[in-house]
Image: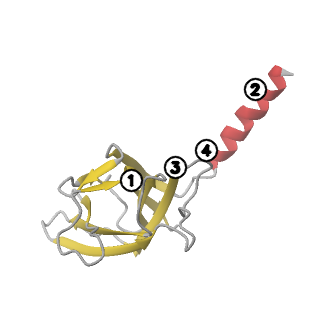
Amino acid sequence: MKIKNNILFLLLALVVISCDKKSVFDEYKSVDNSWHKDSIVRFKLPQLDKNKKYDLFVNIRNNNDYPYNNIFLIVSMEQPNKKVLVDTLEYQMANPDGTLMGEGFSDVKLSKLIYKENASFNLKGDYTIKIQHANRQTGKIVGLQNLKGVSDVGFRIESKQ
C-alpha cells in the first residue's frame, strides 16, 4: 500500500511539473512578512528570444496578516540601452468579504498579477526588473513604512509560442 501511494505521488508530481511548459523565468525573493517601502526587489532576466512574445507577471505571496483589499506597485524595467520604463500598478488582493484572492490551500495565497502581455525583448543585453510597493492608508499622504502580510515577491515570464 505504501509503495502504491509513493508511486501515485511521484506520477502526480511529474504531471504538475510537466504542465508548466510556458514558464521561461520564475523567481521569488523573500521580504520576511513585512515589505519595507524602501526595499526594492530586483530580478535580472535571462536572455530572451527577440522573435518571441512573452507574458510578464508579478507574483505576490501573502497571508491573512495582509490588511488591505488591494496593492499598489511601482514596477520598472531597465533595458540594455539604460532606458527605464516605469509603471504604477494597482491590483485587487481580496474579495468583498475580506478573504484573500489567489491560489493556495492555507492562509498563504499566491496572486499571479499580469504586468505586461505580448511583450518583446528586442535589445540584446541585460534587462532588470525592480518592484516596490506604494501602499498608503486611505486619506494619508505618506506611504506605509512596512506592508505586513507579504512574504515573497516574484517575477514570472511565460512564452506565448
- Point out the frontmost of discs 3 and 2: 3
Residue toward you, 59 or 25: 59
Work out whether mark 4 precedes mark 3 in sequence or the reverse, and give the earlier one. 4
Q: Amino acid at mark 4?
A: Ile
Q: Which residue is mark 4?
A: 17
Pinpoint residue 83: horizontal percent, then vertical percent: 14, 71
Instruction: Locate residue 38: give its quadrant.
Output: bottom left
Residue toward you, 96 or 134: 96
Within 10 angstroms of label 1, few (less than 14), some, or many (20 or more) residues? many
Q: CA distance from mark 1 to mark 2?
A: 31 Å
Q: Which residue is mark 1?
A: 154
Residue 54 visible at all: no
Element at label 3: loop
Q: CA distance from mark 4 to mark 2?
A: 17 Å
Within 10 angstroms of label 3, few (less than 14), some, or many (20 or more) residues? some
Pinpoint residue 148: horizontal percent, then vertical percent: 35, 53
Q: Residue at x 22, y 73 (%)?
A: 86
Q: Which residue is mark 2?
A: 6
Q: Which residue is mark 3?
A: 108
Q: CA distance from mark 4 to mark 3?
A: 21 Å
Q: Residue at x 57, y 54 (%)?
A: 21
- Point out the frontmost of discs 4 and 2: 2
